[in-house]
Every structure is written in C-alpha cells, then in structure tokens.
Amino acid sequence: MKKIMDFTLGLTIPVGPFISRRLKSDVMQQLVPKIQRVEYVIMDKEQDDAYKEAIQEYRAASQARIAKTLEVYSNSILKVLLGKSPTILFSFLCFLSVNPYLPNVSKSWRPQEQTMVNTFNNDTSIFACLLSTRAGGQGLNLVGADTVVIHDMDFNSQIDRQAEDHCHRIGQVKPVTIYMFAPL
C-alpha cells in the first residue's frame, strides 16, 4: 500500500499542470489581466417603474430599460466594436445588425456551434459573437475575444462570472476587459 501511495504522490507533481480541472488560483500567474467595468445606466421614472415591475414578476428587464441601455451602447461600447477589438456580447442583442458577427450560438449546443466558436477565435475579420450568458457558461473556449459585454446581468452572478471566464482563461494572450451594464 505504501508503494502505491508513494507512486501516486510521485505522479502528482509532474502531472499536476496537465490536469484539466484546476483552480484559477493555481494558474493565475499564467493568465492575462482581467479588467472589470460596471457602467451604470440612469433610468428615468418610467424606466424605473417598468424595471421594478419586471423584477416583481421575475422577468427580464423591461423594454424601457433596454432602450436606455442601447443608448449607452451607441455612445460607448460600439466604439470598442468599431475599433475591431474581438468582442463577446452576452445578451438579447442577437437582433442587432452588427456586421460581421457570428450568429447566436446559445439556442442549443450542437457540434456546429463549436465550429462557429472556432471560426470566431481564428478569423480576425469577425469582431463580435452574440451569446447568452447561459451559453457562455457551456464549456466554450472564447479566447478569440479580449472584450466581453454583459448587457443584462443574471440574478445568479456566478452565471456571469462563468461566462466571462470562458474568455479570460489559459490560452488568452491579450488583457480582457469586461463591461457590465447595471441600472441605477
């Protein structure tokens, strides 16, 4: 039994870096910086009322809040997109007409979605990929992007963190900037 324990302990050190389930704290030195920016969107009274109603009914944010947030997109985030920085947009934004971009891969996960993600990671002419945070947490490797925009934050913040960490992971060579929009 001692021989087996010694053998196992002897393998732990050389094999450790190759085990796929590692804690981020174990590999933090290998990761590029991650910058998080929360952009607060001031809502007028109508928007605030609509937002509170949506919270009470356990639905997504109202169209009034979305309209105000889209105004912020046009003033700030689209500058990032126009700068051709590879970007992941986590939200309902699949209806926006941003070209070139990858279509929404969040409806259901099939092998062709992995092909789309590989295309995004490798094709520099594609500067946006539209996903929901739930899809972004499905084991995707999104290191082709250095900018992540989370439009509507999930009530479970771990969903958002998991989604942004699919961009900020081993293999990422550029610092990652995370933009989150939160209503005031």
Image (spheres, rainbow, N blue to C red):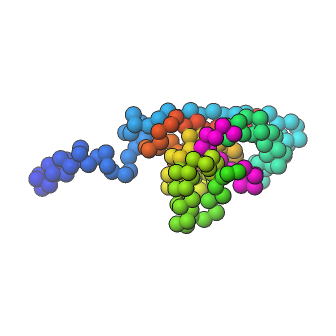
Give the camera-side residue of 6 and 86.
86
Q: From this viewpoint, is residue 62 visible?
A: yes
Residue 149 appears at what percent x and percent y? 65, 42
Q: Nearer the viewer, residue 144 or 84?
A: 84
User: Residue 9 lies in magenta, yes or no?
Assistant: no
Q: Position of residue 10 (x, y in %)?
A: 18, 47
Q: Relative to 111, say whether 123 is above or below.
A: above
* 39 lies left or right of 161: right
Q: Please give the range of residues in magenta.
A: 82-98
Q: Nearer the viewer, residue 111 or 79?
A: 79
Residue 85, picture quadrant: top right
- Residue at screen point 47% across, 42% down: 172
**Residue 19 image point, x, y percent:** 33, 51
Using residue 24 as the reference point, say whether residue 60 is left or right of it.
right
Left of 68 or right of it: where is 114?
left
- Is residue 93 located in the magenta-colored stretch of the structure? yes
Vertical order, 180 against 155 (above or below): above
Question: The C terminus appears in which quarter of the rendering?
Answer: top right
Q: Answer whether residue 153 is visible to the viewer in this image.
A: no
Q: Residue furthest front?
A: 125
| Quadrant in the picture for residue 176 | top right
**Front residue of 126 and 111:** 126
The correct choice, above or below, for 94 with respect to 144 in the image is below
Residue 119 lies in what quarter of the image?
Answer: bottom right
Residue extending farthest to the right is 46
Residue found at x 77% / y 35%: 75
Q: Quadrant of the N terminus?
A: bottom left
Residue that appears at 56% across and 44% down: 145
What residue is rendered at 60% in x and 43% in y?
Answer: 86
